Amino acid sequence: MHQPLKLTVAKGGELYTGISGREITAVAGDLMLCDGEGSVSSILRGPDARTSITSKTTNALFCVYAPPGVAPALVEENLMGLESRIRVFAPAAKTTLLKVF
């Protein structure tokens, strides 16, 4: 994954290889997270294969999408829970940013 990351609204028809290895076609109006090489994930179609976590991964990004009306504090609480579960199998993992936008 390459910075900067950009959150954008899909026009529909954008293509990327999904985590399953199948070609994914974005749905118009879907939110997509992209980097300089293409789509990283979309809400409706899921993550891409290119940036998936492998045994060689040294940096990871976890994005959580919440619908309107969900309190930011609740989202943050759940992110902190995810962080603690990650530390069970990766105790040396470091969080550089945990923020609700």
Image (spheres, rainbow, N blue to C red):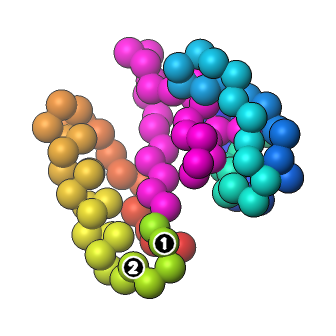
Residue drawn at 79 percent across, 31 percent down: 15
Please state the total of marks drawn on the protein image: 2
Asked if residue 35 can be seen in this view, the reply is no
Q: Is residue 44 visible?
A: yes
Where is mark 1, residue-wise?
67
- 63 with respect to 80 (left or right): right
Tell me the amino acid under the disc marked 1: Pro
Residue type for callout 2: Val
Left/right of residue 24 with respect to residue 57 in the rendered view: right
- How busy is the neighbourhood of tag 2: few (under 14 within 10 Å), some, or many (20 plus)? few
- Does residue 51 lie above or below 73 as drawn? above
Which residue is at the front of the view, 89 or 23? 23
Residue 61 image position (x, y, % from top left): 48, 44
Find the distance from the CA under tag 2 to the CA under tag 1. 6 Å
Label placed on residue 16? none
Residue for point 48% across, 53% down: 63
Q: Residue at x 29, y 75 (%)?
A: 74
Question: Which residue range is magenta in the image?
Answer: 38-65
For label 1, the crowd category at 10 Å Cα-Cα, with few meaning under 14, some 14 to 19 and many 20 or more, is: few
Q: Is residue 52 magenta?
A: yes
